[in-house]
Image (cartoon, rainbow, N blue to C red):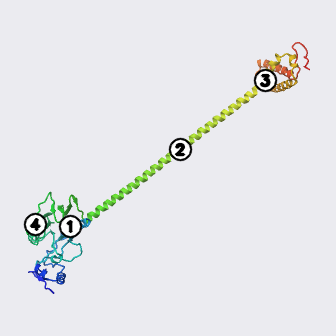
Amino acid sequence: MVALRASPTGFPMAPSVEEWEALSSAERAAVAASLPGEVTDAEMAPPEGERHFKAKTRALDTLRSYFTRQRRRIYLAAEMPTYYPAEPRFAPDLFAVLDADDTERDKWVVSSEGKGLDWVLEVHVGGDRKKDAERNVARYARLGIPEYFLYDRAQNLLAAYRLASPDARIYTAILPNQGLYESRVLGLDVQVDQDRLRFYAGTALLLESDEFIARLQAMYDDAQRRREEEIRRREEADRRREEAEQRRDEETRRREEETHRREEAEQRRDEETRRREEAEQELARFARPARTTQAVNRQMSGTNPGRFSRTPAASRRRLASLSDRSSATSSATSSAMSRRRRRRPGPARSAGARARRSDRRASGVACGSPTRRGGGPRSRAP
């Protein structure tokens, strides 16, 4: 078993490069496993409160979420014991190692991992500021850590340093560009915004987990609101469509009723026309016998009795039948005229007398007994 080296303060240290190379694989694994995975209180600054804790955990959470989405191989850790060859151990507030598997570790042994840290962040809130602002600047540059960022949470200030070349062991300050400090290692810009350390990918702000969740929740709520609004609009459109259909149905029903009323009115008009025609036909039928009687009378008055007596038998029978019908009609007409004379005395009586004389003459003709105006009866034809 290889004995571990101790620092001047008596804490374990990793073997030097020469010692590490002289060890076998089994011995190297044993040495790496024997190095403690924690740092004592004597080696660390006293706790600096919630502002210190939130600042580093928020930065860790933001970077881990971003690189996970980017599927980039990078290892991130906070306050993890770090062992450089023949150097006292230390535990940065946050560090990053590129092209390293993101597996669980309890310490970072540079000789065992094959590479050192690439980016370190220290958060200062209280206590000895020179530790972070001076001693760590010199130490991290000497260890060859490419970039070192110092966030003064108490004053909301940011300082950043970079090695000008891989062989350089003195930092060069990174100058801000409109408040943004470029990290070439991370490929991001860093800025202090109010009371938070912010990271930008180009112009896009990288959100912390709680902000990301809140934004997702807001997006979900907005999508839900739009969905509900769309449902409401569809329901409103359906309601308007149903109302339009009801109005169309009502209009169709009114048109059908109007058509039905027009048809009924036409039927009534047709019925009235039919009744009027029937009445006119009936009146004409009642008036026809009187005209027939008058025609017969005129014929009789201008007919030669001798000629009439020589009319064939069939013609006489037809004429007799016509005379009978005329007599019946004349009787009805005489009755009606008698009633009128009773209601209207005067000249109507002479008209009634004339009508009765005409009826008697017609009756005489119908009976085949025409008389001469000046003599006896004419003999019938053989």
Nearest to the observer: residue 304 or residue 54: 304
Residue 165 disc label: 4
Contact check, label 1 and label 4, Cβ < 8 Å: no
Quadrant of residue 157 in the image? bottom left
Instruction: Note whether residue 342 is visible.
Output: no
Look at label 1 and name its amino acid. Answer: Ala
Q: CA distance from mark 3 to mark 4?
A: 146 Å
Q: Reading the chain from its start, which is encountered first: label 1 or label 4?
A: 1
Say which of marks 3 and 4 sits in front.
4
Q: For the residues labelled 4 and 2, say whether their Cβ atoms are less than 8 Å apart.
A: no
| Mark 3 nearby-residue class (10 Å; few <14, some 14–19, many ≥20) | some
Name the kind of residue labelled 4 in the image.
Ser
Q: Nearer the viewer, mark 1 or mark 4?
A: 4
- Do the CB atoms of the residues marked 3 and 2 lie less than 8 Å apart? no
The answer to which of marks 2 and 1 sits earlier in the sequence is 1
* Residue at numbered disc 2: 252
Mark number for residue 59?
1
Give the secondary structure at mark 1.
helix
Residue 34 in the image, given as x and y percentages of width and height: 18, 83
**Residue lying at 40% horizontally and 55% vertically, measured from the top left:** 231
Q: CA distance from mark 3 to mark 2?
A: 58 Å
The residue to which callout 3 is attached is 292
Q: Earlier in the sequence, mark 3 or mark 4?
A: 4
**What's the residue type where badge 3 is placed?**
Thr
Point out the residue furthest to the top here: 374
Q: Amino acid at mark 2?
A: Thr
303 w.r.t. 274: above or below: above
Q: CA distance from mark 2 to mark 1?
A: 72 Å
Front-most of 327 and 91?
91
Say if residue 375 shows up in the picture. Answer: yes
